[in-house]
Image (tube, helix red, strand yellow):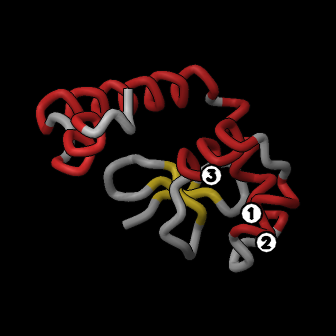
Amino acid sequence: MNRATAYEHIVLDEAGVPTIEGTTMKVVELVLEMLAYGWSAEELQFQHPYLTLGQIHSALAYYWDHREEFEREIERRLERVEQIRRDVGPSELVERLRKRGLLA
């Protein structure tokens, strides 16, 4: 069951993750796109036409008011990706390209 927050359109899911109400979009996913690509609220809406500008602005307001928590979560995600890369190692395609001198 979702719990309401003080932010219109933003709820906490069963795991306590801030999500845009009525969607499966996690606030952190929208924030990562904003940070990675430098997208404005309008560009985020263009990329996600099922979201309203109100939902996007509310998600971004939630992010700015909880920035430290989000930065820790983003760092945790990056560390997890690096761990998976180390565990899995390079793909066969990458190895073949390296042997041919097409990748450094």
Please state if 5 lies on the left or on the right of 73 as rendered: right
How many angstroms separate mark 1 from mark 3 (CA)? 11 Å
How many angstroms separate mark 1 from mark 2 (CA)? 5 Å
Residue beneath the point at 56% across and 75% down: 22
What label sits on residue 52 in the rendered view? 2
Label 3 sits on residue: 30
Asked if 34 appears above or below 80 in the picture, the reply is below
Amino acid under label 1? Answer: Gln
Which image quadrant is residue 55 in? Answer: bottom right
Mark 3 crowd level (few <14, some 14–19, many ≥20, 10 Å Cα): many
Viewer-proximal residue among 76 and 68: 76
Asked if 37 appears above or below 54 in the picture, the reply is above
Look at the numbered discs 1 and 2 and tell me whether their residues touch, using CB distance below 8 Å. yes
- The residue at the far left in this view is 87
Label 1 sits on residue: 55
Please state if 27 lies on the left or on the right of 73 as rendered: right
